[in-house]
Image: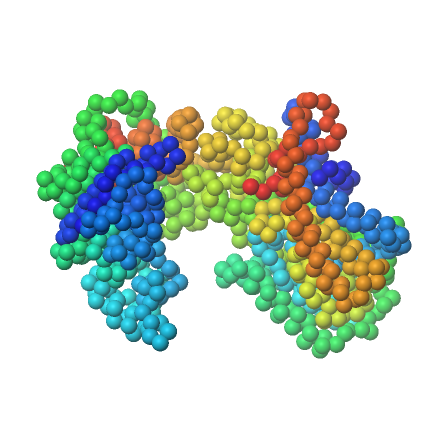
Amino acid sequence: MSAPQPSAVPAAANDNEGPAAPRPRARRPVPDEAGVIGVLILLVLGVGLFQPDFLSTGNLLTTTHNSVYVGLMACGMVFALAMREVDLSVGGLYAMGIVVGALLIRDGMNTWLAVLVVLALSALVGALNGAVTTYLRLPSFIVTLATSMLLRGVGLALAEGKQITDLPQDDAFFRVLGGGETLGAPNAVWVFAAAVAALTVLFTRTRFGARVRAIGSNPEAAEFGGLPVTTTRIAALALSGLMAGLAAVLALAFFIAGDPTIGQGYELTAIAAAIIGGTPLKGGSGSVLGAAAGCLILGVVTAALVFFEVPINWTTFATGGVILVAVGAAPLLRRVRDLRPARDPRAGPAPRHVPDGRSPGRNP
Amino acid sequence: MLVASGLVKHYGGVTALDGVGIALDAGEVHALVGENGAGKSTLVKIISGVVRPEAGTIALDGERVRFAGARQAAAQGVAIVSQELMIYDDLTVLENLFPYGAPRRGGLVSTREMRALAAPVLAELGLDPPPHAKAGDLPLADRQLLEICRALLQRPRVLILDEPTSALPRAAAARLAEVTRGLAERGLAVLYISHFLEEVMRVATRVTVLRDGRVVLPGAPAADVGLDSLVTAMLGRPAARAASGSAQPTPPAAAPPRPGGAAVTLTGVTVPGRLREVSLEAASGEIVGLAGLQGSGHLAVLDAVCGRARPSAGAVRLPNGRSPRSARHAVGQGVASITGDRKGRGLMLDKPLWENVTAVSWLAQGRGGPMPRRAALVERSRGHLDRLRVRGDVRARTGGLSGGNQQKVVLAKWLDAAPAVLALDDPTRGVDVGARGELHDIVRELAAGGRVVLIASSDLAELVELCHRVLVFQHGRVVDVLDGDRLTEPELSIAMNAGFAGTAG
């Protein structure tokens, strides 16, 4: 990729070089996220070329706002996928979280307390996914598929199949997280951005993140080396659940209603977004920022189809096509990048950072 | 009956077979012996048609044949039981016996007919498994016998058994030997390949020895060949002379310091199916070798010390007095599990060196805290890698290094965890000679620094060069201990292959 480094990334990669390391800085590879973010920008500009209205701040913010829910799930999913697990329960958890939150608030619980209950409950359900996966020695695929249905069923039963309305619309919770804006952007978008930043740090900078990546990279070596595989798995799936819960809280605040049928298929969209963003299914690596960008790509496509007046019944078809193209293009781009010869850093000031085949995303 | 002659085969630049011939007669058990890499398996593969020879012929009853694979060979009456088990774990016992299509009735598989066909053969081998049990649920010995049943069901005239007893306990091996002789008496030609020389001497009527791809002892009557001359033929030098005469490298440093207390001890340790009441002690500063053929139990000792195998009886004590409860617990107690299986168990090949080096100390033992400065980790890794003279940048992808350098990274990762016990399993597998020597020096240095070193290796020279003493395992027990002047390659080979009783008697 010859895309310039997006401004959001270098902060994460800067202190790579030890203070005592007298090594040329030009060695630093282009971060993997650059490709996805480049595609996202090109896509937005491309659509804007034909539909200038698409580029209006209002529209871009709305599109982003619509992507927040799946986006949060995709960011959590990165942790599951990076350790060779998958969490199919996030869609069901999302629906149940909304219903439970709506019921608690309708029945008079303090809204912020209800938020905490929903978040705690989602993390707990995620941890249970991890515990069942570990102790029954089942693949997380089947465990979370089952819990997904269980959770959606619980949501439907609690809501008696109906939307839960009659919520106190004027409560600060709905005003702040639902309709509120800060610096011109919806607060939900800020929450999303904060979550992306926090999870990026968690994934790339902390012991927990390193454990997740190490276990995904070589589970047998992790077991051999005495890594706490079980607790890490439980924590990663708890985190994935927590992100679904956070999405539920934001959705409840925005819709001011508890719809038990919401979020059908969100888990698969979240997985697709994570993969588009450079998190391989085989585990070992991943990118929270990439997953967020992948989700925005899918959101932009959905919004663009409206602009191009594609019949609504064709949007699912188009989304499927985009996922296929995006997932197929990423490895292609990576291969092209790896083929480019490495530049000798001493040959002169390199105009841009040249990957030297040691980029973390290169797969053997 | 089956005559192979003038077979030649090269793999790359390595000569596997160089004009090998062998003749099997009806009614005999013909043993084929030789060290690892002598060409035994290649010969079997050529006879079965899996591998094509560059020259030479195979004739069955005087007619030249070339089989396209085990199935075609079986159709012509040549059945092969190969070294690796070819059992379908998820199929039933009966289904496993008819891999090329079960007898059918009206287009459907006839269980009744299968059972009728299988019953006499199963009985002959003394097997009585529930016919609908899954083969994967049977004990290892039964699975091996099942494979032999399958071969016999093809009503072969020539039966080739490649290491048939490597996984069998003594009783089953004896039973198999009896069955094998019975088959020969009925007029089959049996080619019997085995590491266990004693067993070969019991079963075989004639013996052929291969060394370095050549026949060095062609079809000698077993009665005329002694165990010693067999070993001489295998190794190419008399065992006794090789021990004293050949230029041995400087023997390991004099007797190791034996301060009391800090030792790894096993007392009466039994691991079901792998170890039987093994007791041993390895003092700090001592390098103790564990030798044995595959499945003999030497690796189970490492697993027990590293917490991967829980003893059903007896106790493992680490230098600090604790018993390892799990792999993670053992790592926490300072046990380093250094493997030669770099790709499978040792390294994350897609990750940079520093992430591998810190994988145990930081990720497993938690040293450095939940969010250390990355620069500090990288710097610490660089220190270890520089000390071990690893040629490779600390941020380079580990998979891009040579085998020797990768192996040093495995060592660096465990050194970073400050271990008290080193458990090495084939630590220089596939490593070039230079790096091998460096790794050996490091291990000696670590032992001299007061650590307990246990090492298993398929490279006998490595054990001889490195160890203060070597424990030899067979069938889950320690059968011999070699040290001092007795610690030589030929002695070790004899002890592993023939067993203590065989050499003493």
Q: Quadrant of residue A144?
A: bottom right
Q: Residue furthest bottom?
A: A160
**Colour convention of the picture:** rainbow
Q: Residue at x 60, y 44 (%)?
A: A210
Q: Quadrant of residue A271?
A: bottom right
From where the camera sits, is residue B480 visible? no
Q: Is residue A361 left or right of residue B480?
A: right
Residue A346 locus on image (x, y percent): 68, 22
Q: Is residue A316 left or right of residue B489?
A: right
Q: Residue at x 69, y 29 (%)?
A: A26
Q: Is residue A197 left or right of residue B13?
A: right
In this rendered view, identify the residue nearer to me: A42 or A88: A42
Q: Residue furthest front?
A: B63
In this rendered view, identify the residue nearer to me: B154 or A56: B154
**Quadrant containing the N terminus of chain A in the rendered view:** top right
From where the camera sits, is residue A60 visible? yes
Count of number-bearing discs: 0
Q: Vertical placement of B192 versus B74: above or below?
A: above
Q: Is residue B107 left or right of residue A286?
A: left
Q: Vertical placement of B96 versus B418: above or below?
A: below
Q: Quadrant of residue B116?
A: bottom left
Q: Vertical placement of A225 versus B386: above or below?
A: below
Q: Residue at x 33, y 72 (%)?
A: B104
**Quadrant containing the C terminus of chain A in the rendered view:** top right
Residue B290 locus on image (x, y percent): 31, 39
Q: Residue at x 89, y 52 (%)?
A: A52
Residue A20 locus on image (x, y percent): 65, 25
Residue B85 locus on image (x, y percent): 33, 53
